[in-house]
Image (cartoon, rainbow, N blue to C red):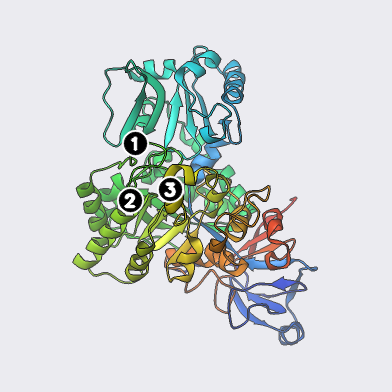
Amino acid sequence: MSPQTTAHPHPVLVTGGTILTLDRRQPRPEAMVLMGDRVLALGGRRQLAESWSTAETIDLAGRAVIPGLTDSHLHLLSYGQMLDQVILNGQTTIQGVLDLVRARAMQAAPGEWVLGRGWDQDLFAERRYPTRDDLDKAAGDHPVLLVRACGHCSVVNSKALELARVTAATPDPAGGLIERDADGRPTGVLHERAAGLVREIIPRPDEAALRRALGRALELALSRGLVACHPDDVRSSGDFATAWRLYSELLPQLGGPRIRIDVSDFQLDELIARGLRSGSGDGWLSVGAIKTFVDGSLGASSAALTRPYADGAGSGIVVQPRDQFMATVRRAHQHGLQVAVHAIGDLAVDWALDAIEEAQAEYPAPASLRHRVVHVQITRPEQFDRFARLGAVAEIQPIFVRTDKLWVESRVGAERARHSYNWATMVRGGVACAGGSDGPVEPLDPMLGLHAAVTRQDAAGEPVGGWLPDQRLSVHEALELFAVGGAYAAGEEGWRGRLVPGYAADFVILDRSPDAVEPSEIKDLKVLETYIAGRRVYRAGS
């Protein structure tokens, strides 16, 4: 549903630079006229200036306009909370992690938890996971929980295990794994739902702290050119009602962005009882998808594969029984609720497509109820035909390739690696795709996602030519992924995502045009201003 605004109905002429509309009929007009919250006209500068002679003018001064961007999968509240924790991204040794933990522990009150996020064992010189024994050397009497970059694996110290009463006798929880040494003693490494054994005893932040964290994340989103987000924040906030209330309070203060809250599957009954469907809301804040998981992450070797990992004995972790998962998807679909299925490995993708296909067969629903499969990293070619046939949306995170390229082949082998992260095959083969960051797993910056999609390289330009270069997207395809894809996933492509007459006046002013710079420079493009519904909601330096 298109939201209502109170923007003043005075014409505004935008001209003097590059305007990329993502509309094939008028891809690069000289000028654009806005009226209130909508795009009114596109065309030549002189023609539009004469037709709307009283219009206020936004002079681009050689800069560029692109449609506003959508992050189709992220965790805004977790991102804001991470900014107050120990940030471990980029650490190349376990000792570096310990130094940061020690510094935070020295500042903390007695017994206060030390929380951190972002470590990646594949970057460590030691080439191993950190353990409880490592953390015990740095934390003193403080309990510690450090989340891996992917969010699907954590390491805790002995104090945290003691408080959570996790011992050698503690069984692995359903959908989780407690790593143990040769004597059966927990090492402190907790995979998937095993981390919940410790998480559940960490004191929850009060609502004021949640509001501060979310406010910081929303402001950051606007500064990165995001006009819409699909956050999965219910678990971080505690429940759907709290998440809804936080966003309801903060969005009017910031002028946006548009938010579709993805709701955890454990609250499916509540949404059904309240008569809520995907899209319920006012177009600024609305119900998104029911988020449910099949597997873990490739980096933590818990993505569910049809064949064992090349560098280990297992095939990953399925985090819930198949019957339970299928029933969740079927029930959500029956009640008009979109699902967003976390599926990284090809087995998990099979499950997601099976569930969507069975639900559609049992309960015919409008084509606008587009179910989503999130991540879609390790795939088989025949799965793409099923995506297209079922109308399922693949929500992909191009930025993952910056680090994952280092170890995908060692994890799954050369053959399966060739069919990994196959964005071009998907986009050009009729699969609807939407782009996201999965922040705080990766930085909340769509320019980095655009760069990765176009180059398939890291920030240093490695590898030369890009990893699996035939899967690189064009600049236009990458922009569509982040501008149109998210709108399509939400059923909103009829009124936003492109700059065409009648569509929302959501746009971003960049210092340069993405199609006028070297691909390696896309990551360095600067967001100067962000407009939502014709109103400026961010300006660099102000």
Q: Report the residue at 79% width, 68% height from top.
A: 62
Tell me the number on the disc at residue 348. 2
Quarter of the image for the N terminus: give it. bottom left
Q: Nearer the viewer, residue 223 or 151?
A: 151
Spot the residue most to the right. 61
Tell me the number on the disc at residue 30. none
Q: Taking the image as drawn, is residue 225 in sight? A: no
Q: Nearer the viewer, residue 415 or 137?
A: 415
Q: Nearer the viewer, residue 216 or 101?
A: 101
Marks 2 and 1, how far apart at CA: 18 Å
Q: Label 3 crowding class (10 Å Cα cut-off): few <14, some 14-19, many 20+?
A: many
In front: label 3 or label 1: 1
Residue type highlighted by circle 3: Asp
Spot the residue most to the front. 414
Question: Which of the marked residues, 3 or 1, is nearer the chain's N terminus?
Answer: 3
As drawn, 160 above or below 257: above
Residue type highlighted by circle 1: Ala
Marks 2 and 3, how far apart at CA: 19 Å
Residue type highlighted by circle 2: Ala
Q: Quadrant of residue 367?
A: bottom left
User: Mark 2 near mark 3, Cβ–Cβ under 8 Å?
Assistant: no
Q: Secondary structure at mark 2?
A: helix
